[in-house]
């Protein structure tokens, strides 16, 4: 019995999914985490380290890690990649177009990490409630998402402030990871 089979069987017993929330600074990662956990979103400040929350969702135990996105912190992201089942990449849809090049490069670096091979990828096109926000289609083009062949991915329009779209994205992540890891015997 291979190590991967043993790990899958252990995870199957616990029905646990590890989710890593990443993205550039000020994209709304912590606000999305607070929205998922039902916490107040007032007074959210930049994450200088990480936040960890555990949530029961659709029969699964979700361990969600929200890591700060400041440039000085990004080199530490790789310390959190081990045993990650899904990456949630948060994009500020109302950001300056120039920032999307750096966003694409950072996402490409993350997806190239061996420890994240096969992880599900959800891109939240956040801040859709802001006038002038780019559409998920425009963001998919700017990030060149169509070229991603190594991961199952989906882009979902959302607003962490209003909560719109956050649940739908989480549903997709859980269904995708659950379908790969917790297949019926």
Image (spheres, helix red, strand yellow):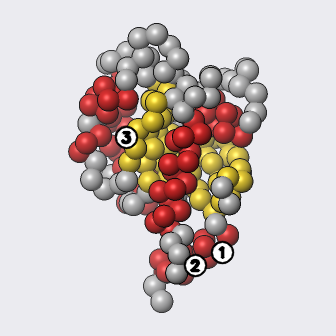
Find numbered disc 1 in the image and state the secondary structure of the residue it sits on.
Answer: helix
Residue 43, image x, y percentages: 73, 20
Q: Is residue 41 above or below residue 56?
A: above
* First reached walking from the N terminus: tag 3 or tag 1: 1
Question: How many C-alpha atoms fall within 10 Å of the one at disc 3: few (<14), some, or many (≥20)?
Answer: some
Q: Residue at x 38, y 60 (%)?
A: 117
In which quarter of the view is residue 58 placed? bottom right
Mark 3 to mark 2 CA distance (whole Å): 30 Å
Mark in the foreground, 3 or 2: 2
Which labelled disc corresponds to residue 13?
1
Residue 182, image x, y percentages: 54, 70
112 lies left or right of 69? left
* Residue that badge 3 annotates: 107
Mark 1 to mark 2 CA distance (whole Å): 6 Å
Question: How many C-alpha atoms fall within 10 Å of the one at disc 2: few (<14), some, or many (≥20)?
Answer: some
Residue 112, image x, y percentages: 33, 52
Residue 51, image x, y percentages: 67, 41
Question: How many C-alpha atoms fall within 10 Å of the one at disc 1: few (<14), some, or many (≥20)?
Answer: few
* First reached walking from the N terminus: tag 3 or tag 2: 2
Q: Are marks 1 and 2 in contact (CB under 8 Å)?
A: yes
In which quarter of the view is residue 156 placed? top left
* Residue that badge 2 annotates: 9
Task: Tell me if I can see residue 125 in this picture.
Answer: yes
Q: Are marks 3 and 2 in contact (CB under 8 Å)?
A: no
Find numbered disc 3 in the image and state the secondary structure of the residue it sits on.
Answer: helix
Q: Residue at x 70, y 46 (%)?
A: 53
Mark 3 to mark 1 CA distance (whole Å): 32 Å
Q: Is residue 78 above or below residue 126?
A: below
Find numbered disc 2 in the image and state the secondary structure of the residue it sits on.
Answer: helix
72 lies left or right of 151? right
């Amino acid at each position: 019995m291979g190590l991967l089979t043993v790990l899958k069987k252990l995870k199957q017993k616990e029905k646990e999914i590890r989710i890593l929330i990443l993205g550039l600074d000020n994209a709304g990662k912590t606000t999305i985490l607070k929205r998922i956990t039902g916490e107040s979103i007032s007074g959210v400040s930049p994450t200088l380290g990480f936040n960890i929350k555990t949530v029961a969702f659709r029969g699964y135990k979700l361990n969600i890690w929200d890591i700060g996105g400041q440039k000085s912190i990004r080199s530490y992201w790789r310390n959190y990649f081990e045993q990650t089942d899904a990456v949630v990449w948060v994009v500020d849809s109302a950001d300056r177009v120039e920032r999307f090049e750096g966003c694409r490069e950072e996402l490409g670096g993350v997806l190239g990490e061996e420890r994240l091979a096969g992880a599900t990828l959800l891109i939240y096109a956040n801040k859709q409630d802001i006038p002038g926000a780019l559409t998920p289609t425009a963001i998919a083009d700017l990030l060149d998402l169509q070229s991603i062949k190594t991961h199952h991915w989906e882009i979902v329009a959302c607003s962490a402030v209003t909560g719109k779209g956050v649940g739908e994205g989480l549903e997709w992540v859980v269904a995708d990871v659950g379908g790969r890891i917790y297949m019926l015997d």
